[in-house]
Image (cartoon, grey):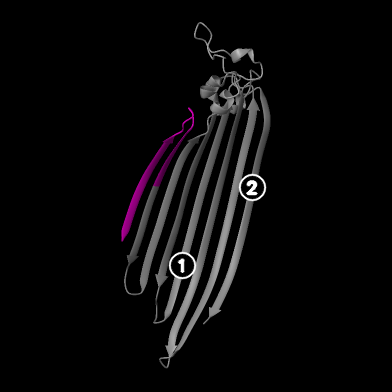
Amino acid sequence: QILFAATYYNEIGVVKGQDFTRYNFRLNLDHQINDWFKIGVSNNFLSSIQNWGSNLYGIAANVQPLAVPYDNNGVLVAYPGNDVVLFNPIFDIDGVLNEIRRNRFYSAVYFELKPVHGLTYRLNAGPDFFNLRQGQFQASHTSARSDGGSYGSYSTNGNVNFVLENIITYTNTFKEKHDLTVTLMQSIQTQRNESSSITATNLPYDYQKWYNIGTAATINSISRYLTQTHLTSLMGRLN
């Protein structure tokens, strides 16, 4: 038995610069090789891109009702209505970017053996890989910076999780009325999470966004983290 499925989802937000796109692929396989051996696998892959953009409506709602965003020559005004507190949010459409990319692959694999009557051995394996990348950029001439110098940040997060289970089950019936079931299980789970980030201000060119952040005049912070966990479990049951 084979199953393959693919989905595509695209949503454009009501605020310009905000959107979400996702791809999803799935492949399942189950095969009974003979009377005593069975194998199966379920694979899933997801990939998405999300743009947060800027809070255009929230900023525009605070601008004076009679203020206009353009001057008589059609040029954008930095401070509509001469309000030195509120910067023109239209600059944010191309100047404030927040992009998040996610990729995940996870799988469930098993094989099952029945070497003798009443005895079953099953192995379950579940790898899970996840990666996230977030890039942020705020141009100097935006409401986020108010001509205070551009800002950029770049961060990544990667997670690897793996589960392995060994299960032995024995069932038998004695004298046609006494049922016996013995189950033994051993499980191992490991997880590794690694993340890094860098933030900077006063980038030389707006078009480079967060891709060449090391050229910034000021590096504000650099961080890197690693966490690892390991869990081993044993279980037995008699019915």
| Residue found at the far front of this picture | 65
Structural crowding at the residue carrying mark 2, measured as other residues with C-alpha within 10 Å and reported as few (<14), some (14–19) or many (≥20) = few
Q: Residue at x 50, y 50 (%)?
A: 129
Q: Secondary structure at mark 2?
A: strand
Q: Give, as a three-letter code, the residue at label 2.
A: Leu
The location of residue 209, given as percent across then percent down, is 54, 26
Disc number placed over residue 123 in the picture, else none: 1
| In the foreground, 151 or 122 | 151
The location of residue 43, given as percent across then percent down, is 41, 54
- Residue on which disc 2 sits: 226
**Figure check: 31 above or below 175:** above
Q: Give, as a three-letter code, the residue at label 1.
A: Leu
Mark 2 or mark 1: which comes first in sequence?
1
Q: Which of the 4 image quadrants contains residue 234?
A: bottom right
Does the magenta portion include 3?
Answer: yes
Give the Cα separation between the discs numbered 2 and 1.
30 Å
Q: Residue at x 48, y 75 (%)?
A: 168
Disc number placed over residue 37 in the picture, else none: none
Structural crowding at the residue carrying mark 1, measured as other residues with C-alpha within 10 Å and reported as few (<14), some (14–19) or many (≥20) = some
**Figure check: 95 above or below 100:** above
**Figure check: 10 above or below 191:** above
In the picture, the quarter occupied by the N terminus is: bottom left
Q: Which residues are magenta?
A: 1-24
Q: Residue at x 60, y 65 (%)?
A: 232
Marks 2 and 1 close (CB-CB < 8 Å): no
The location of residue 16, given as percent across then percent down, is 48, 27
| In the foreground, 223 or 79 | 79
Q: Secondary structure at mark 1?
A: strand
